[in-house]
Amino acid sequence: MTLKTLKIEAEKAIKKAGDLKSLNDAFKKYLGKKGELTQILRSLEKMPKAKRVKVGREANMLKNSLRIKFDQKAGEFKEKAQREASDSEWIDVTAPGRRPILGHLHPLTQARRKTEEIFQAMGFSVVSGPEMETEWYNFDALNIPKDHPARDLWDTFYLKNKMLLRTHTTPVDVRYMEKKNPPLKIITIDRCFRHEATDASHETNFYQIDGLMVDRDISVANFKAMIQEFFQRFFEKPVKIRMRPGFFPFTEPSFEVDMVCLVCGGKGCSACQQTGWMEMLGAGMMHPNVFKNAGLNPKNWQGWVLAWGLTGWP
Amino acid sequence: MVFSYNWLKDYVGRLPEPEKTAELLTMHSFEVGEVKKTGADYALDIDVLPNRGPDCFSHFGIAREIAAITNSKLRPINIKQAVDAKIQTKDFVTVEVKDKKACPRYTAKVVADVKVGPSPKWLKDRLRVCGLNSINNIVDIANYVMLETGQPLHAFDGQKLAGNRIVVRFARNREKIVTLDEQKFDLDSSVLVIADAEKPVAIAGIKGGKLPEIDKKTKVVVLEAANFDGRVIRQGSKKLNLKTDASLRFEHGLDPNLTEMAVIRTAQLIQKIAGGKIARGSVDIYPKKVYPKRVKLDQKYLTSLLGKKILPKEINNILKRLGFVVRGSLVTVPTFRQDIFLPEDLIEEVVRIYGYDKIPSVFPIVSLAPSRRNLDIFWENKTKDIMKEFGFTEAYNYSFVSQGSDSAIELENPMSQEHKYLRENLISNLKKNVKFNKNNFKDIRLFEIGKVFSRPAVEESRLAGINLLGSFYDIKGIVEGLLNKLGISDIKYIENGRQSASVEVGQEKIGVIGENYFELNFDKVKKLASEEVLYRPISRYPSAVRDLAILVPRQTKVVQVLNKINIAGGKLVRDVDLFDIYQGEELPQGKKNLAFHIVYQSETRTLKSKEVDEIHQKIIKTLEKESTWQVRK
């Protein structure tokens, strides 16, 4: 093969090569160890000198020019491959991410934890008691005698085993005072039951918070300070409260606590029924009869009790 | 209870504007709901506290409160009467009280020659504001005096009472009565009645009978103002399922000393409005007179309980305004205040009139005792967080279910048949939740911690979870992961029917796993849980892994194979990890393939390849001793 035809063929092969592999094959065919041009160069030494110089120069020129062409073409292929690779790695960062499957805690649990946390920070222990109660702990011990109209305030589920479903968590106070001597600071947040039709603010199963603080000379003034502190921590802003008379058989004096409506700030709105106040909880000073029923001498101890339904607040 | 603003004006010297009156009552006595303009009057909806029924289910009682709050004059009710000296009450009627406990006082008075007719407009108006309909002048006056004084009254036609007799007794079984509003009631011995010589003529303290009804022809009115035992009236009212304005007042208790004044007031108004002559005297059966109590009030205790010193002069002044008589530290309690027994009761009277707003906020000075850690709550919180991390969402279900086993506790008074029993497990309600939500969500994972109940009176805390798309192994993985995080070890899973296992720790069953749910006794879990965590350093020497596949009968349990591997391998077997269970058509029938990674590692040296191979061969040999097992090579 003459150098001339070799040049034409080789250049054609380079032009024809569709990818890096076929280009490499072509390279091997002409410039590889056993390539056609390589063979021509190797055959030079057997040629007569004059021909050797001429053919040698032409062959080397062809080799260099083919090399440049191969490299150029290879560069094109590599560039293209790189471009394609980066194309496949490209992502749309605005497309949504894939999220892990998330579990959730019930909002009641969250409110419960927040309440417990604040009271615990004030030195209160969280305690609990049974949901299925006796009449004694649910009523009699709390100064609510049988056949007394006061019992009507607590619509009660009675059970066929002569027990009842506790209507409030206050029985836990009596159970606790029977076991532990004051001073004591406890709260209970647990399930209670009322036999009443369900609507937005009533449930047959609900959660009540009961708090109790007993010491030698705990007063109404102490209650006022502590409940205000609690509200401010719970709602995370300054709040205004007021106390007005109430009635609970197990407290004397008894009071209701209202807070300035968080929605309207006291101007009156639909959330507070235009009163500017929200009813927050019932409370009072523990009745001496309850201390007696729990085995404590009422002459020695004073304390406040409070209770509210966990779902009742804004 | 609804009160007329104009009516209150009769007694209170300077009654503030309706809105102001409502606000004062709310802050010092009782919450006032609505103030509604009604004609020329205002209706105040006052939520009288239940212990104040005896004195405040009446306009005069509310007026006394307002007068005490505003420190203004209280005008008494006029009870001057012009009696006709020629006639005497006892000539018209005789009264016998059979049960003096059920009826501590019975007062009767007669007005003769009345003219029954419609009531005057002012009377009708006042009753209407308070929500009562006008009947005739006699009945209206009786109702009016009840609203005024709190004492229920009843008027009989004296000429319709057989034998001119009134007998207060319990009904006889099978006695019947038709009430004024034509309702028929079957009575029994739990119901107290007013009878004439023959039959019941009224249900005592609840409602009058049709027979001696006041009508247009009535000439002689026998007025009854009685005091009945609250429990007896409550019992009768419940028995007959009949509540009235009268029964409400008796149930809350009344001052027995109120009857006489109320009956005179009624007679006086009847004479004024319906004419007639007031008979002299009254028939008054009042064997055990009630006298005022005395309660000692200790100033120091008052200061300590309120956390505020109130001047003795101020205290005495407040108590006097409310009708108490104060002499030194002794306070005489008027008989209309049936709610006052103790010094604490008096302290409440003082502080509410004084004003809770004047009590300062003072933090207590107490010993610094750290709060006790409640492990129950600690483990409950931790468990909830773990379940949440596992992708489960917390549910709070009702404690009630529609069906129960033999050991279920049944409710006496369920709200509905759907809620007839206390739940015996948590999973049935969770399954319902899943069923209910299936159409809206594909992947549902729920858990709940709550109480379950069984006879005779067992209450147990449980934890249950369900995973709609999960398999037995997914659920088992949750239980394993949870117990591991709670530091519970030595757990066994015992086959317990189809796709179901019981979970045991030590020798104790703590729960079950089903095809896509689990339920554990959470009381037991909390007891077993431990915060101790064992940390073991990672070995500094490399580990070697060899895989092992074994063909075993389908019934062979993984744990059997694992045990053999561990025993044969000894302590250089650091971990055995089952990575595949396969049972497919290509395998011989009734067989399954188990594939394990066995990790060999020493904590003290680098294991040689030869050493590892030797142990691995020993394991294979041990496994192949089982004739039905075949290690695949």
Image (cartoon, rainbow, N blue to C red):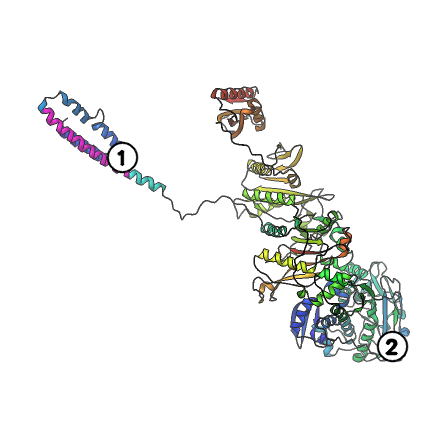
Q: Amino acid at mark 1?
A: Asp
Against B466, residue B564 (above or below) is above
Q: Nearer the viewer, residue B71 or B225?
A: B71
Q: Verify whether residue A67 appears in magenta.
A: yes
Identity of the residue drawn at 33% across and 39% down: A85
Marks 2 and 1 sit apart, C-alpha to C-alpha, by 131 Å
Q: Nearer the viewer, residue B420 or A20?
A: A20
Q: Amino acid at mark 2?
A: Ala
Say which chain tag 2 marks.
Answer: B
Q: Is residue B39 visible?
A: yes
- In the image, taking residue A38 as reference, residue B501 lies left or right, namely right
Q: Secondary structure at mark 2?
A: strand
User: Measured from the top left, where is residue A142 in percent x and y?
Assistant: 75, 54
Which residue does the numbered mark 2 point to in the structure image?
B279
Say which chain tag 1 marks.
Answer: A
Q: Where is residue A216, by image quadrant? A: bottom right
Against A164, residue B621 (above or below) is above
User: Measured from the top left, where is residue A89 in percent x and y?
Assistant: 36, 41
User: Measured from the top left, where is residue B284 in percent x and y?
Assistant: 88, 70
Q: Secondary structure at mark 1?
A: loop
Q: Where is residue B480, by image quadrant? A: top right
Q: Is residue A144 visible?
A: no
- The quadrant of the picture occupied by the N terminus of chain B is bottom right
Q: Nearer the viewer, residue A37 or B425?
A: A37
Q: Which residues are magenta?
A: A51-79
Q: Where is residue B330, by image quadrant? A: bottom right
Q: Which mark is residue A19?
A: 1
- In the image, taking residue B283 as reference, residue A73 lies left or right, namely left
Identity of the residue drawn at 78% across and 79% down: B273
Mark 2 crowdedness (10 Å alpha carbons): few <14, some 14-19, many ≥20? many
